[in-house]
Image (cartoon, rainbow, N blue to C red):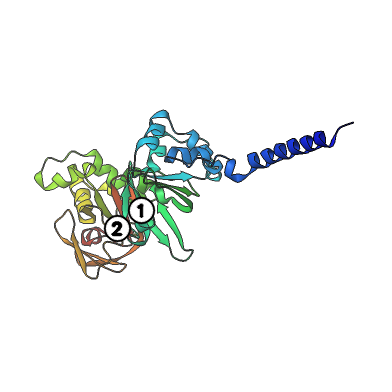
Amino acid sequence: MLSNHGIHRIVLCACVFFAGVVLAQSPESQQPLARPLNAYEVLKQLPETSKFSSLLDPELQTYLQNQTNITVFAPHNDAFHHTLLLDRNTTKYHILPQLCLDDCWTKNDGLLYKSTSYMKFWINHDKNIKQIESGNMQFAAIVNSIQVSSQQSVVHIIDSILTVPLDIETTLGNLKFTKARQLMALVNQQHPNSSRNDEVSNHTSTTLTLFMPNNQAFGTVDPNTLGFDINAMIYNVHAVKGLYTSQQVKTPNNTIHNLAGSNITIRGNQISIDNNTASILVKDIIAENALIHTIDQGGLLLLELH
């Protein structure tokens, strides 16, 4: 039979043991979860970006671990319902080599940013959400954002996969603008020698804004029946060197110059080319190194061909 002294020792040991268990389980004694140090760690830790992170090759992983001032647009796993694979160029397109927080939308609503190619940021004011427009008129909305302060970077989780902008001819074809696509194909196939067509011969190496007539605007005019000089003249009338978004050209009475050397004046949704007024139908279609605005009438030259 235990003495009182033995009982006291057992009770004391038990108290020490249970106190140790409570201490071990207390929040103060646990190691806090490590904060992600870079964008790649964020993508790896988030269950909803596991599919996108699995597509990152070692070079992109290293870039996301070491580079500062970057923005990652990571499609949510649900965005991969049509495909489980992205080519490397598409994956890289989702990584922007600059930090884009709220200011990129609130202060620069409707302007372009460049990754491997261009994309446009804008705010859907009806739904109060930030959106990105990519090639082929593909939109994505931001559903969540995780800022990595130690890396001065941010991961925006988006609800759709962005599409890399394609060349002008392919973009027009995807939009079913068959006559404008034919015109571009014919211009691309030619190798002009005269100095007046230097702009046409160099159009693939520079950025352009195109005010392209739709099929109805071409009417009975068939680019395939026109010679190169006429097609080149039509192209020059509707092309402007440089990228001009609808946001940039909405200034009242804003005038820019086309490749033919004449004025293009824009007032709201109305555009005047060679004193012929047309309506801008679809704005800011992003192609490779180009922006396309579709219009319902062609320039004066196109009207004279009807």
Q: Is residue 151 left or right of residue 210?
A: right
Residue 46: give x, y in percent of width and height: 53, 42
Residue at image coords 29%, 42%: 185
Q: Quadrant of residue 95?
A: top left
Q: Nearer the viewer, residue 231 or 92?
A: 92
The foreground one among 49 and 90 is 49
Q: Which mark is residue 120?
A: 1
From this viewpoint, which residue is outermost toward the right?
Answer: 1
Q: Residue at x 29, y 65 (%)?
A: 278
Quadrant of the drawing holding the N terminus: top right
The reply, left or right, for residue 107 in relation to residue 200 is right
Counting from the top left corner in percent of width and height, residue 50 is at 53, 38
- Choose mark 1 or mark 2, whichever is in front: 1
Does residue 219 show up?
A: no
Q: Position of residue 74 (x, y in %)?
A: 46, 44
Residue extending furthest toward the top: 58
Residue type beneath disc 1? Lys
Label 1: state its secondary structure.
Answer: strand
> Image quarter for residue 47?
top right
Can I make out residue 90 in this image?
A: yes
Residue that badge 2 annotates: 245
Label 2 amino acid? Thr
